[in-house]
Image (tube, grey):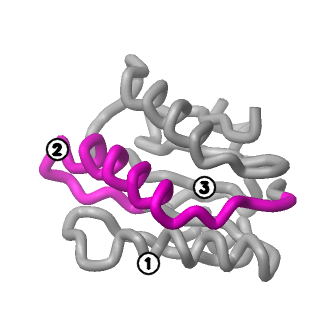
Amino acid sequence: MSVSFTIFPRRGLVYVRYEGQVKLQETGAVFAEYARHPDWRPGQRQLVDLSGVTGFDPDYAELLKIQAQKADVFLRGATEVLLVYCAPTPATYAMAEMARRSWEGLDGVIVRAVHSEAEALHLLGQPEDSIAALMASAG
């Protein structure tokens, strides 16, 4: 599976990790699993780690379909959702920017794309400087 998630309920944080070739259909299926998870809560901040991505299918129509699915879930509560993409390479940053642009003009979802784990964690208000440290201390 090229996408997985871990919910840290006490932190109000979800860690999403993509690896290998990203398949948007798989993203939709895993997101639906997240939306049904008992630890899902409105307003959970999202750390989307693209550091393990080797490629992706830039199917903009499929992306918009998935973003609509996400909007239905993210906007269930009155709390804004912060999505931070950690995209360390030019290719993953382009992927993050494509996703960010698909949210433009939609109130309730704030999206940022950054190059480093430390910057991503800082934007999400986490004390760790690396995802490995987050997983060790929050898990």
Instruction: Please name whichever residue, 98 or 42, is drawn nearer the observer in this view of the structure.
Output: 98
- Is label 2 in contact with label 3 (beta carbons under 8 Å)? no
Q: Position of residue 63 (x, y in %)?
A: 49, 58
Q: Residue beneath label 3, please? A: 48
Q: Position of residue 30 (x, y in %)?
A: 55, 32
Q: Residues within 10 Å of mark 2 (few under 14, many from 20)?
A: few
Horizontal relation, residue 135 to residue 48: left or right: right
Q: Quadrant of the C terminus?
A: top right
Q: Residue beneath label 1, please? A: 101
Q: Residue beneath label 2, please? A: 77
Q: Amino acid at mark 1?
A: Arg
Looking at the rendered structure, the secondary structure element under dot 2 is: loop
Give the residue drawn at x 60%, y 55%.
48
Question: Where are the magenta residues, as a range?
Answer: 54-82
Q: CA distance from mark 3 to mark 1?
A: 15 Å
Q: Amino acid at mark 2?
A: Gly
